[in-house]
Image (cartoon, grey):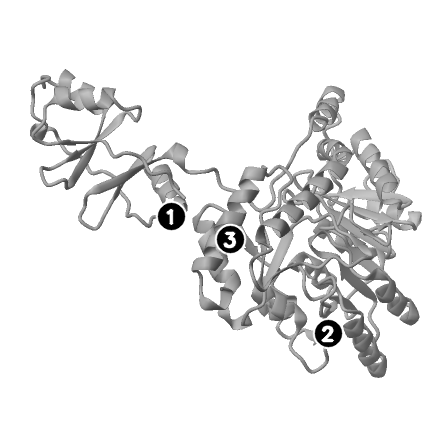
Amino acid sequence: MLKQRDVVTVTVDKTMRDAIEVLDKTALGIVLLVDCDGQFLSTITDGDLRRQLLNGATLETRLIKFPLHASITAEPDATPQKLLRLMNENTISQIPILNADNQPINIVLRVDIHAPILLSTPHLGSEELEFVNEAFRTNWIAPVGPNIDAFEIAMSEFTGAKAACAVTSGTAGLHLGLRLLDVGPGDIVFVSDFTFIASVAPITYQQATPVLIDSEPDSWNMSPQALERAFATASKRGQMPKAVIIVSLYGQSADMDPLIEICDQYGVPVLEDAAESLGATYKGKASGTFGKIGVFSFNGNKIITTSGGGMIVSDDESLIVRAKKLSTQAREPSIHYEHVEVGYNYRMSNILAGVGRGQLNVLPDRIARRREINTLYREGLMNISGLQFMPEPNWSHSNRWLSCITFDCDPEADIPGSLTSYLQSQLVEVRPLWKPMHMQPVFADAEFHAHDEGNAAFSRHIFQTGICLPSGSNMTDDEIAMVISMLQEAVANGPPTLR
C-alpha cells in the first residue's frame, strides 16, 4: 500500500513568489502546477524556479508564463513495479498520481516504494572476506590452492562423507557423477521428473536417455511406487538403467530408504542430486550421503553460496580422486601436458572456495532462520482456506531453502500465474514451482512413470497449484509480514477459486 501524501499545488494565476513560499512549507522540493480548474499542467522543482529567476523572471512573474515541460505521471492503480520502472527510466524521484479528470490526488516519492523483496538472495557473513583476502595475500588465485583443500575437508566433516571434490557448479558435479558411474551413449538413467533441468540435462551430455519418475505427495520427491514400476518395465524389456538420479527438492530429502532399497535390489547405483538440500537430514543422516555419489550446489540463490559452484561427495574415495582428475582436464601426472582421456575444466577456483569456507561456518544459522521464516508464513497464512505448505514428513528435517505453498483449486485456473503476476507487480518476487520435465518441450518424448498408475502426474498437479515464497535468510520480519499481507490481499480480492 503506497503512502498517501498531501498534494501541494499552485495555480497558474499565482506568482513565482507564491510558488517559492509553497515550496518552503513542504519538504518535498516539488510543487504541482495546475490550471484554475485544478487540471495538472506540470511539476515545478526548486531548481526550475532558480533557473527561471536566472533567466530574467522576477518574484512577481505570473506562473502562467512558466515554461511547461512534459511530466511523467501515473494513474491511481499504478503498481509499485510500474512506478519504480518509470522513475528509473526517466531518472526522477517522484511521480504525481492523477485521477480520471487529470487532477493530482497523490504524489509518490522513490522513498515511498519499498525495496524489491527477492526470492532468495546471497547472505554473507563476516569470515568470507578473510579467506578471500588470504588467497590474494598468498597469490593463490589459480583454480587450486589451500582454500579448496580446506573447503573440501570441511564439507566432508559437515556431511559425514569420506571425501569431496569442489567444482564449478552443481550441474558440473552431476555431469562428473555420471562419468564416474560410467554412463555413456545408449545408456538409460532414471531421474526425478519434478526438478530443475540441471538434474536431467547432464544425462543428455553423455548421450544417454532419461526416464522420468514422478513425485509422491509426502515429500514431493521421487515416488518409490513409480520407481518400482519403472524398474519392472525395464526388467521386462531387458534394458536396465545405468544409474538413478534422486533429487531432494526445496531443501527436503527424498524418502531415501525405500528408494535405495529398490535400487539396491536391481544393483543400480544412485547419484543423489542434493543441490537444494545442503544441511537437511533424513532420519538424522545428511542429505546427499545416501547414494554412491552426492552433489550439492552453491549457486547464488542457494542456502549458502560461492557465487557459483558445487561439491561432489562420496564414501568411495577412489571416485573423488577420479573426479578431481576429470575436473582438471584429465591431465596425467606428468611434467608435460599428457592426456589419455578427455576431461573438463570443472574445478572450483581457490577464491570462490574461500567464500565457501566462510559460508559453511554460518550454515546452521541460515537453516535456523529459513525454518523460522517458514513458521512465520505458516502462522500468518493459516486462515486461508485450502492453502497448504510443502509437507515435512517425520523422517525429514528440511533446511527450508524455499517456503512452498499450494492451493486446493482447479489446476487449470492458473492460480500460480495470477498470484505471481500480482505479487511481482508489488515488487515481491515469487515463482511457480518447478515445471516437471515431462511437461518441458525438450523432454516431451521421454518415458514417464506416474506415482498413481493410470492417473495424472502428481508433479503436474503441484506445479499447476503452487508457488515459492521469498525465503532468504536475510529477510526481515517486516518484509515477511509485508509478503503475508499482500498474499492475504491477493487471495481476498482474487478469483473465486482462491476465496
CA separation, marks 3 and 1? 15 Å
* Residue 142 in the image, given as x and y percentages of width and height: 73, 32
Q: Of callouts 1 and 2, which one flags the residue occurring earlier in the amino acid sequence? A: 1
Q: Which residue is mark 1?
A: 79
Q: Is residue 75 left or right of residue 139?
A: left
> On the image, which quarter does residue 249 sit in?
bottom right
Element under disc 1: loop
Q: Is residue 231 above or below residue 327?
A: below
* Picture disc at residue 451: 2
Nearest the camera: 420 or 446? Answer: 420
Kindly indicate whether the residue at mark 1 contacts the one at mark 3 (C-beta within 8 angstroms): no
Which amino acid type corresponds to the residue marked 2 in the rendered image?
Answer: His
- Label 3, on which residue? 487
- The residue under the point 53% across, 61% down is 416
Q: Are marks 2 and 3 in contact (CB under 8 Å)?
A: no
Image quarter of residue 45: top left
Q: Position of residue 403 (x, y in %)?
A: 64, 51
Q: Are marks 1 and 2 in contact (CB under 8 Å)?
A: no
